[in-house]
Image (cartoon, helix red, strand yellow):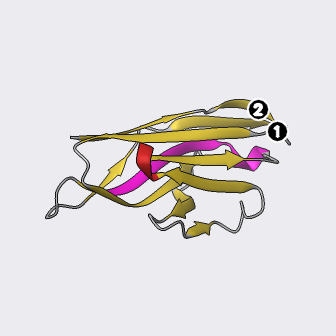
Amino acid sequence: QVQLVESGGGLVQAGGSLRLSCAASGKIFSINVMGWYRQAPGKQRELVASITSGGSTRYADSVKGRFTISRDNAENSVYLQMNSLKPEDTAVYYCNSGISSSRYTYSDYWGRGTQVTVSS
């Protein structure tokens, strides 16, 4: 089985920074896209940022210039550096990844989420 485990959430004042980490473990043959989503209370889950195995990145307009996604393919890990945080960034942040456990399988996996709270 494959697991994604997030860490790094917490409470921070507006203008502050946090770094989220997510590590994939288990039976892993290859990892395609890794990304971060977030869900605020009463809102739909939305893409924050994603990164391919080749390093191509994609960001939500609301976080461009403030957040940076990166990954360590050797460690099966993805990171989200969040700077200049705003109260509207408050949400549960979820790690997501498309992972193959063999040459013939591919599944979409989610972490359990980590809470990020930005106070004004």
Tag 2–tag 1 contact (CB < 8 Å)? yes
Point 48% across, 39% down: residue: 113
* Disc number for residue 12: 2
Point 61% across, 43% down: residue: 91
The one of 73 and 49 positioned closer to us in this rendering:
73
The main secondary structure of the magenta stretch is strand
Secondary element at image label 1: loop
Image: magenta residue range: 87-99
Q: Residues within 10 Å of mark 1 (few under 14, many from 20)?
A: some
Point 64% across, 37% down: residue: 116
* Disc number for residue 62: none
Q: Residue furthest top?
A: 11
Q: Give the residue at mark 1.
A: 16
- Residue 68 is left or right of residue 46, and the answer is right
The one of 105 and 15 positioned closer to us in this rendering:
105
As drawn, 50 above or below 112: below
- Residue 110 is left or right of residue 93, and the answer is left
Q: Where does residue 82 sit, x and y in percent of width and height?
A: 71, 47
**Residue 99 sits in quarter:** bottom left
Say which amino acid is labelled 2: Val
Q: Where does residue 58 sit, x and y in percent of width and height?
A: 59, 69
The one of 54 and 8 positioned closer to us in this rendering:
54
Image quarter of the C terminus: top right
Q: Where does residue 54 sit, x and y in percent of width and height?
A: 48, 68
Q: Residues within 10 Å of mark 2 (few under 14, many from 20)?
A: some
Q: Is residue 78 magenta?
A: no
Gap in angstroms between the C-alphas marked 2 and 1: 6 Å
As drawn, 46 above or below 28: below
Secondary element at image label 2: strand
**Residue 1 sits in quarter:** top left
